[in-house]
Amino acid sequence: MTAPVMTATALERHYEVGGGLFRKPRTLKAVGGLDFALYPGKTLAVVGESGCGKSTLARMVTMIEDPTAGSLTLDGKPVVREDWASLRKSVQIVFQDPYGSLNPRQRIGAILEEPLKINRPDMSSKERTAKAREMLGLVGLRPEHFDRYPHMFSGGQRQRIAIARALMLDPKVLVLDEPVSALDLSIQSSVLNLLVDLQERLQLAYLFISHDLSVVRHVADEVIVMYLGRAVERGSRDDVFGAPFHPYAKALLSATPQADPRGAKERIKLQGELPSPLGIPDGCPFAPRCWKVRDKCRAMRPELPQGHHAAACFFPENGGTPA
């Protein structure tokens, strides 16, 4: 089996929140104990509600923030702050908003050449321009677009430019943080197909972060479902979408729109409030909203078992192994 490009072991990120003259600051555990591996040519999708820790995970993987605990490895070598400058060439990110991620004062050619100016000072101006023009064609844009400004492009074209910029340094890992959620539905499929094509050509490892399960179903190989900073289910795309084990994953999937309006589908409406990440209850964090909750769930926190398809649940759905 191909070796992973990047691995994460018990990855955590905590923040100190609040505090003051008479109060101690509280700890917000944005990500708690996450394990995963990214492989060449494969896509790991991380899904969950807003606030579950997806974007915090993206910042750690792209070396914008340090993990509070746990470790990352890239090509088998530990990722440490002292090596961030050199390692960032191998891990790039495509942000959610193509309108805000491009400098409106720069021409597209200058935007694409900038990563090379910073990270590869040995390249000549002619070489940088040739590389930028090549990348522009790779993402489906025309040569005349090289000298235009970002405001002259549609949202889909701007996201293609952002993808081209992320590929300028020939990365091995691409973090895609909600890369199509700001685009019209008619444009999303073309950008997703471009990402699939680029992955096949360049054997990129994708970390795809999204709350849109219909998009994830199109691109993912493996799926991690997160809830309040922790992974509650892990498995292949077909396993998670075909027979989810965790009640939370089942509820998320029940809310996904279907292409066939005649298809019968049971919508699961969660009751109760989402707990505050500053005051996660004892036991299972999902217990206050779960229709299968029992006393054991309120007293003990289930851990995510090892295995190809597993869920952190004492009473899983669809014949899953209990935690």
Image (cartoon, rainbow, N blue to C red):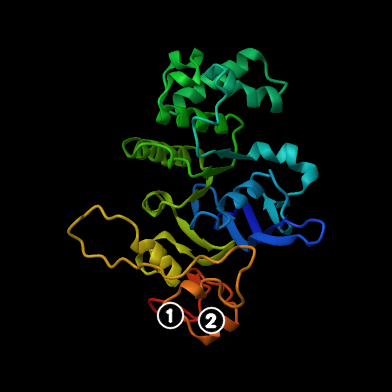
| Residue hosting label 1 | 292
CB atoms at circles 1 and 2 under 8 Å apart? yes
In the rendered image of this protein, does residue 233 appear above or below residue 38? below
Look at mark 2 in the image and give the residue it sits on: 297
Sequence order check: which comes first, mark 1 or mark 2?
Answer: 1
Whether residue 110 sits left or right of residue 316 in the image: it is right
Q: Is residue 5 visible?
A: no
Q: Position of residue 202 (x, y in %)?
A: 51, 38
Circle 2: element type = helix
Mark 1 and mark 2: Cα distance apart in space: 9 Å
**Residue 77 spot, x, y in % from top left:** 73, 51
The C terminus sits in image quarter: bottom right
Up-down relation of residue 83 to residue 259 (above or below): above
Q: Estimate the x, y position of residue 3 in percent, counting from the top left.
A: 60, 54
Residue situated in front as seen by the camera: 128 or 290: 290
- Residue 204 falls left or right of residue 80: left
Mark 2: amino acid = Cys
Viewer-closest of 81 and 133? 81
